[in-house]
Amino acid sequence: MFLEFKKQVNSALKKAVGSLNFEIDDFELEASQHADIASKVAFRLASQAKKSPKDIAQQIVEAIELPEDSLLGEIKAVGPYINITSSRSYIDKTVTGIREEGNAFGGGFCEGKILLEHTSANPNGPLHVGHIRNSIIGDTLVRILKHAGYDVETQYYVNDMGRQIAIVSWAFTQFEFDVSKKPDHAIADIYIKANALLNDDPEKIAEIDKRMQLVESGDEETIESFDVAVSHAVSGIKETLMRMNVKHDSFPHESSFIRSGAVSRVVEEIKAIGRTADDKGALVVDLGDYGFEKTLVIQRSDGTSLYTTRDLAYHEWKGERADRIIDVLGADHKLISGQLKATLNSIGKKEPEIVIFEFVSLPEGSMSTRRGKFISADDLLEQIEEQAYMEVDKRRPEMAEGFKREVARTVGIGAVRYDIVKVSPEKSTVFNWKEALDFEKQGGPFIQYSYARACNILRKAGEELSWISAQDIDPSLLVEDTEIDLIKKMASFDSVIDISARELKPHAIAIYARELAESFNQFYRFVPVISAEEEDIRASRLALVECARTVLASALNTLGLGAPESM
């Protein structure tokens, strides 16, 4: 609803400014503590009109004409600013809109095909804590973009032919694979052992190099050994992702771009524009005119391609299939992703939008799969769920074991996802499970508890709710400050979705969900709902609780958090 309000603000200002014979397209709209939206357009018109911004602001306000039933209410010039407050119609239409649109409220205003790649961890072991932020940022963005209206395909790009995979496939010939373990953990065991053996006997590295040459040349037996290793790891990784409410639509494999000839084609395209040079037998790309001093290697001296080369072919393929392509990458990919974009630009191909995130860590320190120093995502989730169970058991000891376990799972996963996504991607963060699970703090459990509270209120209303749901209620009876604040907060859901989708900032939704939960709690704290004496006011307030439940559910779903009806 806020997007429509903003559209009407733009329209009103445009007509008023035009009537004063000024020309301007940007009305400098911004959030304000003194109104629902403010405009700084008078500052920009000052030189054109040769008047003070204060005088111009007043002229514009006096020239504004509003149609009947406008979403705009009071419009005032406050010094050089134009402050605009929404009308009663805005409040009433928000309530009506939520009741009519349900879970679709606040979305559906964008269109187009997006391919979004995230996680794409090397399949040489389980996901660890360092991977989790990639998965959660990526999945939250997917949910945001889908709610905005985009057709989104989520991809996990499988590195099935790099050096790490060559080591894993070789490890199968050296060590026994423990089939009793979760497959990605069993893969990590032999991978760690293989690296230790290679460190002790460096001559064996030649066997790894040979495997990489064989797989690129199409040797079926070697390809099969790589496929077996990768499939074991990916099956375990999928299981972990599903546990975190993360799902991928497709898993394109690196090797497919070798076999299809796409890698050879992209190398020839780069050669054709004269950007390549020979560097001791290796083929490199000069990107100096794009600001990169370091050249990009796209072919080794032995003729084999690199991950980067295959990534170029993969992105060329994606660019032909989508309106937008988005990658979620760690800060260690900043240089290579810049070179990737520059190279694609140089051959006239679509560039990806890159979301770079800093790493999440635990107080315990850094992690490395190769050295065996890592805390797996599975281990972390187990610990979180157990801690969440203890909290639920303390709060609801009378409930059945199944209830407590299910709520603990929902709250635990929600705590992890929220605590990680609430921080802007470009900022590093330390995950602290004690803070994440604190029901009193405004984190994931707090938002989930607010949703459960709304459900509980409606349950208590019982038959009365069924009657209200079938009737037209009167939103104009909702006049208390906390009621208006809650309605306006719900109305702004589409604006937050819009900003998050355009700027690829998932933390904006996390902040919004927390503020929405707080607005709902403030309303419930100060306004009687079920105990309201007047029947029509009680009906309107129950309808407002129903609206809050709907938008809280959408916000939780967009964040990938479960929405428990009881906690």
Image (spheres, rainbow, N blue to C red):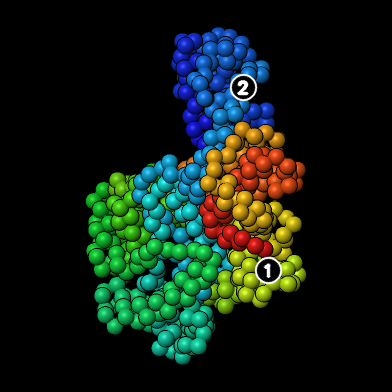
Circle 2 SS class: strand
Q: Which mark is residue 388?
A: 1
Residue 387 percent across, percent down from the top left: 69, 71
Are there few (<14), some (14-19), or many (20+) residues within 10 Å of tag 1?
many
Image position of 224 (left or right of 149): left
The kind of secondary structure element at disc 1 is: helix
Q: Is residue 321 above or below residue 204?
A: above
Residue 334 appears at what percent x and percent y?
49, 54
| Residue wearing tag 2 | 74
Quadrant housing residue 264? bottom left
Question: 28 or 9: which is nearer to us?
Answer: 9
The residue type indicated by label 1 comes to Ala
The quarter of the rendered structure image containing the C terminus is bottom right
For the point 68% across and 69% down, the residue is 388
Residue at 47% from the left image edge and 11% from the top image edge: 19
The answer to whether residue 421 is above or below residue 128 is above
Q: Amino acid at mark 2?
A: Glu
Residue drawn at x 44%, y 84% is 171
Left or right: 234 in relation to 419: left
Q: Residue at x 73, y 72 (%)?
A: 398
The number of numbered badges drawn on the structure is 2
Residue 199 in view of the camera: no
The picture places residue 38, in percent across and down from the top left corner, at 60, 26
